[in-house]
Image: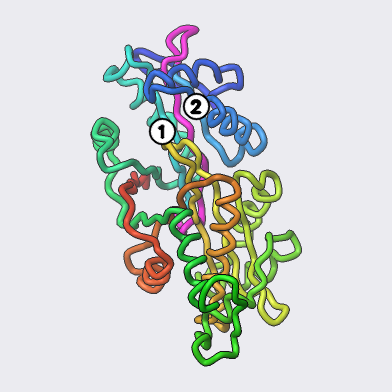
Amino acid sequence: MSAVASPAVTVKPLRETDLDAVVAIDAAIEGRSRRLYFERRLAAALKQPEQHVQFAAADGDALVGFILARRVHGEFGRVRPGLRIEAVGVTPARRGLGVGRALIEALQGWARRHGAVELRTAAEWNQHAMLRWFDACGFRLDPGLIVDCAVGAYRQAERDDALELAGGAGREIDYGAPENNDFERVQRARCDVRPMQPQDLPQIVRIDAQITGRQREAYIAARLAEALDDAAIRVSLTARLEDAIVGCLMARADIGDFGRTEPVAVLDTIDVDPAYAHRGVGQALLARLFADLGALHVDRVETVVAPDHLGLLAFLHDAGFRPSQRLAFVRRLD
C-alpha cells in the first residue's frame, strides 16, 4: 500500500511499531487504555494481511491518527464485498483539520483497488460527534436492523425453560410425559452441537447454498480458519441430528470496536437445513453459543437482520433479541 498525502498529514500503512502511539491516541479519546484490544487487532492483521486494512496518519514523525478496518463479504447474508471500519481515532489537537477525512480517503482508495464496493460501520445512537463525522464523510443509515441479547438473560431463560420442563429443580425431564411433549424443545435437547471442523466444510457449504442460493465456500472456509486459529476470537459450531450436519453458526468476539465498554459477540451466520426446520436446531445452536460465551465472559450478542428477513427476525425475537441502541451505517463506493 502506498502512502497518501493530505495538506497536513501523510497517510501510510499502520506498522507494528505504531502500537504505543495508537493506544495513546485512543486513551485520550476514551479516557482509558485499551492496549490489549489494539494488540489483538494488529496481531490479526499480521497473521491475515489480506483480511485487514490499517492506516496511520503522520505529521512528520508524530502519529496523529489511525483507522482500522477489515474485509467483509458474506456476513449477515450480504453479497457485496466491503470493508468494516472497526476503530478510528485522531489526536485531540488535530481534530477538525481533515485528518479523519484523509484516513477515510485512503481507505476508499484501497477498497476500490481491491474490489470492495462499500464501507460499513456502526455506532451508538447518542455518539453525536461520531454520527456527525459519519454524515460529513458520506455515510448513510443502513436498512439492516441491529438486534442484541444479553448473555446472562438468555442463559437464565434457558435455566427457567429447563426447570419448567422438569417440573421444578431436582427432577429429571421426562420427555414422554404429556405435559412435556413440546416437539421443538425435545429435539433441541437431542441435537448434538459441537465445534466446527475442517471436514465439515462441504456439508456446511451445501446447507448455506440451499438457504442463500449462492456458493460461499471461500467465505465459510475463511471464517472456519479464523475459529481454528483463535477460539477466543471466533466461535464456529455445527448441529447434528440423525448423524448428519443440519445447521451451523458462526460468531466473533468484538471487544473494543468504537469504544465498546463490554465484550460483545457478533453473530454473522446461522444456517439450518430446510429439511430440519422447526426441529429446534437453531435454538440448540444459540444455546451452545451463549454457554460458550458465558465461559469467555462475553456479555452480549448482537447481529444484523435485513428488513425483509422476517422469519429470521421472528426467530431471534423469540430467542430474546431486541432492537439495539446501535445504528448501522454504509457508504457505497460504486
Residue 261 percent across, percent down from the top left: 42, 36
* Label 2 residue SS: loop
Between 242 and 79, the residue placed more toward the observer is: 242
Which residue in the protein does label 1 denote? 259
Q: Which residue lies furthest to the bottom in this view?
A: 178
Q: Is residue 229 above or below residue 46?
A: below
Nearest to N terminus: mark 2 or mark 1: 2
Q: In this view, does 10 lie above or below 270?
A: above
Which residue in the protein does label 2 denote? 34
Question: What residue range appears in magenta?
Answer: 58-80
Determine which of the numbered discs, if any, sits on residue 23 in the image.
none
Residue 190 percent across, percent down from the top left: 64, 77
> Label 1 sits on what residue type?
Gly
Residue 78 in magenta stretch: yes
Name the residue rendered at 55%, 45% in the picture. Answer: 297
* Label 1 residue SS: helix
Name the residue rendered at 45%, 40% in the picture. Answer: 262
| Callout 2–callout 1 Cβ contact below 8 Å | yes
Quadrant housing residue 193: bottom right
Name the residue rendered at 69%, 82% in the picture. Answer: 242
Tell me if residue 282 can be seen.
Answer: no
Q: Are there few (<14), some (14-19), or many (20+) residues within 10 Å of tag 2?
A: some
